[in-house]
Image (spheres, grey):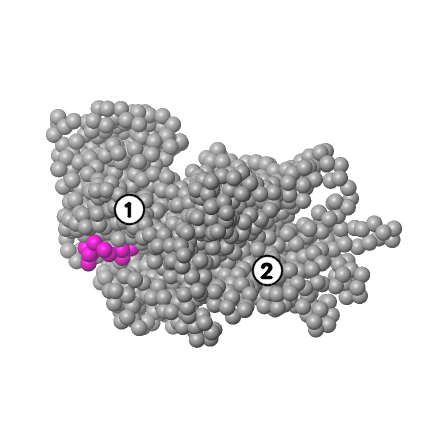
Amino acid sequence: MEKIKQNPIVKKLGFNRIILFCILLIMYGVFSAVIQGFAGAARIMSILNYAYFLGFLALGVTFVIATGGIDFSIGPVMFCCALMSGYTLNTFGAPVIVALLMSIAIGLCFGCFNGYLVAYVGIPPFIVSMATMNIAKGLGSVFTKTQSVSWPQANDPSGNGWFRNLVKFNDFPTGLIIFIVAVIILYVVMNNTKAGRYILCLGSNKEAVRLSGVNVRKWQMLAYVICGMMAGIAAIFFVGAYTTVQPGLGDTYNNEAIASCVMGGTSMAGGLASIGGTVIGVLVISLLQEGIMALRMTKEVQMIITGLIVIVFVYADVSARRRKN
Amino acid sequence: MTKKKSIFTQEVIVGIVLVALYFIFRLISSDFGKYTTFLSMMDISYYYVLMAIGVAFPLITGGVDLSIGTGMICYALAGGCLIRFYNVPTGVAILVSILFGVGIGLANGVLISIMGLPPFLATLCTCMITRGLGSVVTGSFAIPWPTAKQDNGWFHSIFKISTANNTKLPLGLLWIILLMLLMQFILAHTKFGRYTISIGSNKEAAMLSGINVKFYHVMVYMVSGLFAGLASIAYAAVIKTVQPGTGAGMELDAIGGAIVGGVSASGGYGTIYGTVLGAYVIIFLKQGLPYIGFNANMQQIITGFVLIGAVAIDIIKRKVIK
Amino acid sequence: MGDVILTMKDISKSFPGVKALDRVNFELRRGEVHALMGENGAGKSTLMKVLTGIYTKDTGIISYEGREITFHNTHEAQEAGVVIVHQELNMVGDLTVAQNIFIGREFKKGFMIDDRKMVQESKKLFDELHIDIDPKAKMSDLTVGKQQMCEIAKAISHKAKVIIFDEPSAALTEKEIEDLFAIIRDLRAQNLGIIYISHRMDEIKVITDRVTVMRDGTYVGTLITSECTKEDIINMMVGRVIYEDPKTHSMVPKDAPVVLKVEHLNAGKMVQDVSFELRKGEILGFSGLMGAGRTETARALFGADPKQSGDIYINGEKVTINSPEDAVKHGIGYLSEDRKRFGIVVQKTITENSTLATMEKYMPGLFINKGAEKAVAEQYIKELDTKTPGADQLVVNLSGGNQQKVVIAKWLVRNCDILIFDEPTRGIDVGAKNEIYKLMNHLASEGKSIIMISSEMTEILRMSDRIVVMCEGKKTGEIPIEEATQEAIMDKATRDIK
């Protein structure tokens, strides 16, 4: 066991991440064996539909957690983006492209708001998240007059349904391509750019980075801005797959997004983040979601299992670090 | 030698704000002043305030308990199930609900204190788990508790009693005040309270002073669970039918109340009376804003800004003193 | 000196991969102050932690008051009368002084804690020790020195028979150290056994009766303080001879240009109207007692803390410095006294730390050129002789001296011309100290200008070309090295203290 852990390739990929990936494969195997017709393109497409929006949320929040902060307003923010832009599209007849850009812009605004309060005013991220969560829910409800919003279908006569091609073009998963591109970009940002380096370092020791002559506030805020923008993008993929959004909801998704990050090896203490790990975490949760649904159980069962998996992984991480010290 | 303390502590300010809110609402809306409005507002307040009192303890240790909202629903469902399907006496069901809460609190405590998980994550997981458990226990069906008129519905009178001439009295308020005094006393004058503050202020120092920090840290989360259990009874008494899958977000209102009431978000400081006052500010906003012509949803936005405002004022105040 | 109260015999303790203690012996008598000395990492703290039950020993025997004994936690040790005054302050800032002193053993009235009795007892305790502190004050409102006094009072209040002081003087002013020594002498007179851990050689000579020296986790020997010299102790500690001769004359040419000029700098209470000049290639020593405002001056100059007023000129040009960002832009680098908190990012690699202040240099486009980054880190590992398996090593795994070198590398990569060294050798063992000194001299000879803040008189006299003395936030003197003596500096450093 120890020998495997010391292997340089294993070390680079991260032992826990390999285990998590194995769990993913085993889960897929078990679901395929137990449920008839689970192994097939249709299911995979369905899993991916869930993975896209959850993935964008989780990738965004990975940056925030890397700074040692937290943002659990992202679920409601995503819904708020989808509601406000969808309402604009349906009620004011705005072109789809405007609605899509608006969604991203709203996400960005929330990100800037959160980031500014955390980095410049100095309010604890936990409290800012709580407040933003309320604000996002309220704003979505007020803007849409508490009506749910349905985005146009693919064959909508208005021709507004083209945006669904971003998620699926005929039977080709275009969303997967976009998602992979986003993962690659964010991976590079996290590991190969100044922004990522500063975000990780300030998550580990903010004061030391500041005294190195770095404008830490700017970079800390950037993490929240990235997170907000990702929530805006996630909103597009959510409605692209699930069409309808209701005001006042969205809480469960931030839990799942944070759970994906943490499973994947991003430390809540800041300074350590793994984009790849987050992606695997997202896939695990999406697969679980699909499998539980296929077994005709409620979403709540999936939550219990997700909760337990997170506890196991965080405990493994915590105890490994404790042994090292 | 010591600095003169300003009398305008966060608690006092919150108290003033609370009174001001009440009079502003009354001035604008004649309905707000009605006794029935007051009664219904009190009804709603009990479970929020109970949760807030409980969660103040983890907050003071520098932790948090996110599982109280979904937990409360879960305990209420479990108790309700026992009455509905197994004809268990109400008293026993109430006891089970409360003990269930203490049990989840114990689980949180063990995860955090003994296994060393970050409080935020550990309770996030138990939040998801309790939410799921509630549905699993009831098979996803909503569970009604006995109504006040039914024989086994006596527990309603814990919170609200009718007098001879059929006016209703919010008895629950009395319990809230008593519990507030009791918990404030425990926080300020017993070992448990003192060590709660010590853990939040400097855990290492507490450990080196020979305090069994792990034990007290677990206790803190058990108290939080206990109060979530108590809240579940208050919830069942007010909201007649308990829906599985709800409850998420309620913990944030309770936590928000504690923070507005001056509990330090980074631990080490807080009072229970402040917590109760803060929780009532949130409830006033929640229940009162619609009376003065605000969209019910505006309330959420305003609550968000109030929360940021309360903490920002504290931060700015500290900067000025420096 | 009385009879033996505590003996530790053949104590060994291993951590995964390290033998922290190897058959160490130690003996303490009643009524003696016994110094425990050794370089950092020699195992002093580990030995004390084994004694007080924080660690469990692998082998060996501890006998206390004639009986063999093993404490399983600090609480048991306290009960038996063995208490430790920790190096880091271990106080709960949000509680009052009295509450802190009796934490873990509160007086009770039924369920209630009897706060009034705790205040009375604290008062009694402070009276005995001649300390003037209000027991009802909130701990976080006290100065560091006062907090330390509370810590000592707390230790004494345990009805202690053995008290361990782990570098108690590190944060104290001279006056407070005198008070501390008075208390220690008092305790010795009461026949208590006292273990005193310190790095300050002068103190050892003043206060202790015997000295036990450790090196690399082993026991080297025990000396009677009055019969040995400082050099004897140092030789035992490092196993080689070290010379700490003062500098006799300035190494800076008379016509060296002024690179930094600070005029009328004001920042809070700790920095009042401070002005000075720094020349090219000069090492300017900042001397003074703890709390004299030296670190505050440096931080205000560097933009780390806000300042009220003052002008800064670099190479004759007036500059605005409002943040560390500005300071670094103007070529100033700051090496903090508290490396772990302010200097390095411990969970990151040497490479990442080395280029932290210079990211732009290693980004030809949008992306970091990791090859170039690693190359420069390796270059400085070689140049500074940093002991590490490689540039990918996490900084947390390095020793104090090597961590300091990583911080130095960070500023050298940035090519800073003005370097502020705040207590450059704090927590660094004697051997590595010399290397840092050599490095500083080398940097100065290359034309870098250095401000060195130091509380060690020997360090000031050995390194500085000129000395600025501060006292209570004001500059009280400026002495060229040719005229500098310990007495002259102390005189100016205590000028304002009544």
Tell me, yes or no, whether the highlighted magenta stretch contains residue C70: no
Indicate the position of residue C344 as horizontal and vertical percent values.
29, 48
Q: Residue at x 36, y 42 (%)?
A: A219
Disc 1, SS: loop
The residue indicated by pointer 1 is A193
Q: What stretch is highlighted in magenta?
A: C387-397
Chain hosting mark 1: A
Q: Nearer the viewer, residue B277 or A151?
A: A151
Indicate the position of residue C151 as horizontal and vertical percent values.
43, 51
The amino acid sitting under disc 1 is Thr
The residue indicated by pointer 2 is B245
Instruction: Tell me the chief SS of the magenta region.
Output: loop
Indicate the position of residue B263 as horizontal and vertical percent values.
55, 47
The amino acid sitting under disc 2 is Gly
Tell me, yes or no, whether the highlighted magenta stretch contains residue C396: yes
Q: Is residue A199 visible?
A: yes
- Residue that extends furthest to the right in the rendered view of this protein: B165
Q: Which of C32 and C380 is in front in this view?
A: C380
